[in-house]
Image (cartoon, grey):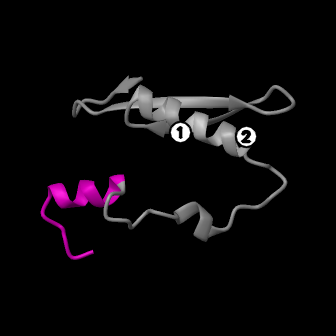
């Protein structure tokens, strides 16, 4: 967990690939959220992304502009709602 000067707490989590190399970091807003996300990836068999498959920009940006995304909520704090 890292606490930023603005008081925001972010949890980082890592995985290890089949060669033992550490992958990540990925972030979550709480320890429970990070744990639940990792468990859901384990169930899907997708905890370690396949390096051989190139990620499209669409996959990378999926959910970025969703109403509940972290970025949109951040903008709403400053009154920016016409997104």
Q: Nearer the viewer, residue 42 or 1?
A: 42
Front tag of 1 and 2: 1
Range covered by the magenta-colored residues:
70-83
- Is tag 1's residue or tag 2's residue first in the polypeptide sequence? 1
Residue 76 lies in what quarter of the image? Answer: bottom left
Residue 39 lies in what quarter of the image? Answer: top right
Residue at the (23%, 60%) spot, across then down: 75
Q: Is residue 25 visible?
A: no
Residue at the (58%, 61%) spot, across then down: 60
Residue 38 lies in what quarter of the image? Answer: top right
The residue at which mark 1 appears reads as 37
User: In terms of secondary structure, where does tag 1 sit?
Assistant: helix
77 part of magenta stretch:
yes
> Gap between marks 1 and 2, in whole Å?
12 Å
The C terminus lies in which quarter of the figure? bottom left
Q: Is residue 79 left or right of residue 51?
A: left
Residue 67 pos. (x, y %): 31, 64
Label for residue 5? none
Residue at far bottom of view: 82
The residue at which mark 2 appears reads as 48
Q: How many marks?
A: 2
Residue 32 pos. (x, y %): 43, 28
User: In terms of secondary structure, where does tag 2 sit?
Assistant: loop
The N terminus lies in which quarter of the figure? top left
Residue at the (64%, 41%) spot, across then down: 41
23 part of magenta stretch:
no
Q: Is residue 81 left or right of residue 61?
A: left
Residue at the (68%, 37%) spot, across then down: 42
Residue 62 pos. (x, y %): 52, 64
Above or below for 48 versus 35: below
Residue 19 pos. (x, y %): 87, 30
């Amino acid at each position: 967990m890292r606490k930023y000067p603005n008081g925001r707490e972010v949890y980082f989590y890592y995985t290890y690939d089949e060669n033992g190399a550490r992958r990540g970091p990925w972030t979550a807003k709480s320890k429970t959220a990070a744990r639940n996300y990792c468990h859901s990836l384990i169930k899907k068999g997708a905890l370690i992304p396949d390096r051989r498959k190139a990620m499209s920009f669409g996959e990378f940006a999926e959910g970025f502009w969703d109403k509940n995304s972290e970025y949109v909520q951040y903008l709403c704090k400053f009154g920016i709602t016409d997104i």
